[in-house]
Structures are given as C-alpha cells and as structure tokens.
Amino acid sequence: MTEATEHLAGNRIWTFRTPRARLALWAGWLGLVALFVFCWQVMTRGTIWAFVWDAPTQARDIFGRMFPPALAYVPELMVPLWDTLNMATLGTMLGVAMAVPVAFLAARNTSPAPRLLRPVAMFVVVASRSINALIWALLLVAILGPGLLAGIIAIALRSIGFIGKLLYEAIEETDARQVEAVTATGASRAQVVGYAIVPQVLPTFWGITVFRWDINIRESAILGLVGAGGLGLKLQASLNTLAWPQVTMILIVILGTVVVSEGISAKVRRALI
C-alpha cells in the first residue's frame, strides 16, 4: 500500500492509494468476480436444478429412514471393524518401513547422492501424496483382487508421501552442531547418522507415525467401498440394499472408532514429543 499526495488550494491532502492503485484494485476485484462467475457456469453446466430444489425433501426422507439405528446389527460389524483396524495398522507399519529410507535419501544432509538420489526420493514422495488411498485401492483391487491385502498396500503407498515428507524436513532441521561434534570424533557416515541425527528426529518420527496411523484408520473405513474389505464393505452392501438403519449404525461405529483413535494418538504424541 502506498500513500499519495494531492495539492488543493495550497494544502497537501494525503490519500490512502494513488488513483492508479485504486483503478488496479477495482480491476482486480472485477476480474475476480468474472472468474467466479465463469467457474460457477462451468461447474453448474450439467446441473439439473429440479433435483437441487427437491434435495431438502429427499434429505428429510432419507434421514427419516435412517433412524432409529439398527442396534442389532452391531455384532456383525465387529469382524469388519477388526479388519479395518488391522488394515490401518499393518498399512502404517509397511508405509513407515518404506518411508524412512526415502526420507533419508530426500534430506539434503543425509542423501549420499543429492543430485541423483534426492530427485528420485522426492518424486516418490510427491507421487505418493498425489494419489488418494481410494485410487490406490481401486488399482490394487483390479491387480490383486478384492480383500484386505489390497487395502493394506493402498494405505502403505499413501503413507509413504506423508511420512517421508515430514520426516525428511525434520532431518534437514537437525542441529548441525551435534553432527559436527560426532564427526570430529572420527565417526563414519553411518555412525554420524545413528548417533547425531536419529536421536534428534526420533520423537518427531514417532509423533508422525502415530498421527498417520490415526489418519489411516479413517481412510481404511471407506476402502471397502471399492472392495478392499473392512467397514466400507458393509457400508456398500447396506447402501446397495437401502438398509438405512444399518447405514446409520455403521456411521456411528466409524465415528466412535475415529474419536477413540484420535484420543489415543493425541495422548501418545504428548507422551513422545
């Protein structure tokens, strides 16, 4: 922002912006409004507005059918719930096993070949973060067939980017003085990493792992929609048969699981960090 002066009857009058700045500001707002209108037209080009106006009525009808929840359906959800937890846990463990070496290769201060290996590691991180777990599951179900294995691998592939990015940033932010002190003792490169870098990033590593496990529980709950097993498979079956009370019960179980996992991960992170 700039201040402009105008001369009027020999007096200097201060204005907040120059006329040119005000014109540019109004042109910017006009361009933003025009862009919004254009995007709105593109997004609503195929919209059937009769369905939109009828949406509140349909929503009331569906929510009316969803209550009361089917409490008798809870015993059938215990095995899928266990599968969902196993999918998230095993997927997180596999993702961590693959993400740790990627993170050390991506960090500038630990990569053995920054010009060669670091771009490859960064590509792995970006590729993993760019593809949603649901899309990974779709691809893996087509390759491996339906089941928990596809879900576990999908969770792992999605976790590599998240864990790898946060971990390599933590590695790059380590205190260089500790590295120099260990190096001065004549330690090898592996010893420098083990005694100067790993102890500094270990609390962050555990915090990232627990946080990702919490996220993976939420993602595992819906991977069954594409055939990866767990609660999502039951949800898909209930939706296909229009068993709305069962849908409500499944959503309640998913919500309860997420709340409990959030509490556990928060306590573990506070204890570790």
Image (spheres, grey):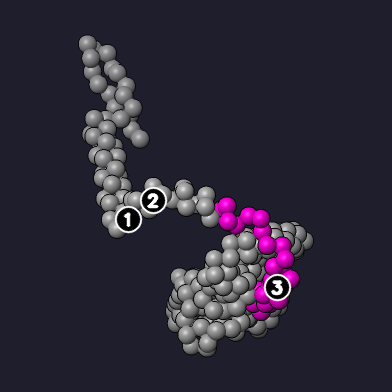
Q: Which residues are magenta?
A: 63-90
Q: Which residue is mark 2?
A: 52
> Callout 2 environment at 10 Å: few (<14), some (14 to 19), or many (20+)?
few
Q: Which residue is mark 3?
A: 76
- In this view of the protein, can residue 67 be seen by the observer? yes
When asked about the image quadrant of residue 97, the answer is bottom right
Of the residues shown, which amino acid type is indicated by label 3? Glu
Residue contact at pointers 1 and 3, CB within 8 angstroms: no
Residue at image coords 69%, 71%? 77
Element type where label 2 sits in the image? helix
Check residue 47 in the rendering and tell me which mark sits there, or answer none. Answer: 1
Query: Residue 117: image x %, image y %?
Result: 48, 82
The numbered mark, 2 or 3, whose residue comes first in the sequence reads 2
Element type where label 3 sits in the image? helix
Please state which of residues 237 and 22 is positioned toward the viewer in this rendering.
Answer: 237
Please state which of residues 24 and 80 is positioned toward the viewer in this rendering.
Answer: 80
Residue at image coords 33%, 51%? 49
